[in-house]
């Protein structure tokens, strides 16, 4: 009798799984933790299914009203309600619950794989600057690193203005939030800042103050030098709160634990200037992924390097074929960011374009720009910093046009 019950339950589970696949097609999430990311919509997560492998589930809306969810049948984990499926939802209850299939629809929770071939409108919107160079609040002079917060405010390292400026969403001018007190080395001054990151919890601003060879933090108009004597090109922070800084002259990237600013730990380079896999030649912008791999724009080697955690050398993930404008080349790469599929976006400075590279591929592809240097909405003139907002819109610091360009995602 037990064998018959197991046989029936097995076939029931197979039937349920088959029904789900037919109903929602690509919304099965595999090898994903409970509530793990499974969609381009951050409000969706993976719900593990009863009777399936531990890391297999359906991708659905994370915040249904718990009181409206009914327990699954305890004998066979079935659901009597139409259009529901039995899933684990421990935030609501320890027992399996019947979850409405309307909340696992692909329109509500678009699958992650839709990020692979993302495209952007080729004519950008100017969202900051664009009023020639100058010191007025509606002007930028040589913008470099940028940071987009959750409200789509843009924080900009205005390099030749010696200040950090915040442009609120849809604002016509910016507000000075650090520096802006002339070019100098006082604590309240900056000198050619190259990059900026913002802690969105305590609102502290960490700045690569290149001209003063320091990394400095501003919090409520109070300043603290975090790191002295460093020719800082780029900044990044990982999900654990470690701070990473590239050193242009020492040709290395170091990591610091927040609050403990000693010598730091070399995580990439540190073997002198050169073009070997364990060397850099003017490392600038950097990005750190969830695995603590460090991506580095190795500018004068015309390549982007990836250093895995604890690696002794890096791998070339973009460029590395000399200066040029072919699709397998870069010419002074600047800003670099990596999406959650590992696709690498690079500001190809002297080619006036933004490239996308997939690790292991011999060539990249142009995603925006690439129409020669110029001021038109489909042109860039020596792009530097890059960033995405939560919707996937691409922002570019268009340095010699003294503006920030927003390329809207095509949904």
Image (cartoon, grey):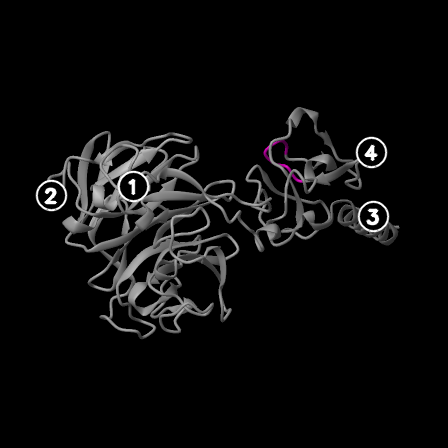
Marks 2 and 4, the one that precedes in the sequence: 4
Residue 194: horizontal and vertical position, in percent? 26, 49
Residues packed near mark 4 inside 10 Å, few (<14), some (14 to 19) or many (20 plus): few
Q: Nearer the viewer, residue 208 or 124?
A: 124
Residue named by callout 4? 80
Could you give the CA–CA distance between mark 1 and mark 2, rounded to whole angstroms?
27 Å
Residue named by callout 1? 132
* Horizontal relation, residue 266 to residue 110: left or right: left
Marks 1 and 3, the one that precedes in the sequence: 3
Q: Residue at x 40, y 59 (%)?
A: 293
Residue extent of the magenta highlight: 88-93
Residue named by callout 3? 12
Residue named by callout 2? 185
Q: Nearer the viewer, residue 153 or 56?
A: 153
Marks 1 and 2, the one that precedes in the sequence: 1
Quarter where residue 146 is shown: top left
Q: Residue at x 40, y 73 (%)?
A: 321
Residue 269: horizontal and vertical position, in percent? 28, 66
Could you give the CA–CA distance between mark 2 and mark 4, rounded to whole angstroms?
71 Å
Residue 186: horizontal and vertical position, in percent? 10, 39
Q: Is residue 219 magenta?
A: no
Q: Are marks 2 and 4 in contact (CB under 8 Å)?
A: no
Q: Which mark is residue 168?
A: none
Q: Are marks 2 and 3 in contact (CB under 8 Å)?
A: no
* Foreground disc of the pair 4, 1: 1
């Amino acid at each position: 009798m037990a064998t018959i019950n197991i046989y029936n339950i097995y076939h029931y589970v197979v039937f349920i799984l088959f029904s789900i696949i037919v109903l929602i097609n690509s919304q099965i999430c595999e090898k994903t933790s409970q509530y793990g990311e499974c969609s381009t919509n951050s409000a969706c997560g993976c719900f593990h299914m009863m009777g399936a492998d531990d890391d297999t589930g359906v991708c659905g809306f994370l915040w249904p009203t718990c009181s409206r969810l009914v327990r699954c049948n305890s004998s066979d984990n079935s659901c009597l309600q139409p259009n529901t499926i039995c899933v684990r939802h421990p935030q609501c209850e320890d027992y399996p619950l019947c979850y409405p299939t309307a909340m696992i629809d692909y329109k509500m929770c678009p699958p992650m794989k839709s990020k692979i071939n993302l495209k952007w409108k080729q004519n950008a919107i100017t969202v900051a600057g664009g009023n020639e160079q100058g010191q007025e609040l509606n002007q930028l002079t040589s913008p470099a690193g940028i940071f987009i917060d959750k409200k789509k405010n843009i924080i900009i390292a205005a390099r030749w203005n010696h200040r950090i400026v915040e442009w609120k969403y849809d604002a016509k001018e910016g507000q000075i939030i650090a520096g802006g007190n002339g070019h100098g080395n006082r604590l309240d001054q900056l000198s050619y800042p190259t990059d900026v990151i913002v802690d969105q919890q305590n609102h502290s601003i960490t700045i690569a103050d290149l001209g003063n060879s320091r990394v400095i933090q501003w919090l409520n108009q109070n300043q603290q030098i975090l790191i002295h004597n460093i020719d800082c090109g780029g900044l990044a922070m990982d999900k654990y709160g470690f701070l990473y800084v590239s050193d242009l002259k020492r040709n290395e990237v170091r990591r610091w634990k927040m609050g403990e600013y000693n010598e730091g730990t070399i995580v990439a380079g540190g073997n002198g200037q050169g073009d070997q896999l364990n060397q850099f030649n003017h490392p600038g912008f950097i990005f750190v992924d969830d695995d603590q791999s460090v991506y580095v724009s190795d500018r004068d080697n015309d390549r982007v390097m990836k250093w895995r955690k604890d690696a002794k050398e890096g791998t070339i993930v973009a460029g590395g074929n000399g200066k040029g404008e072919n699709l397998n080349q870069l010419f002074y790469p600047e800003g670099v960011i990596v999406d959650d599929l590992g696709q690498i976006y690079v500001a190809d400075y002297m080619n006036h374009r933004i490239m996308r590279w997939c690790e292991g591929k011999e060539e990249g592809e142009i995603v925006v720009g690439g129409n020669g240097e110029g001021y038109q909405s489909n042109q860039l003139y020596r792009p530097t910093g890059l960033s995405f907002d939560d919707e996937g819109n691409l922002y570019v610091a268009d340095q010699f046009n003294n503006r920030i360009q927003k390329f809207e995602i095509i949904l």
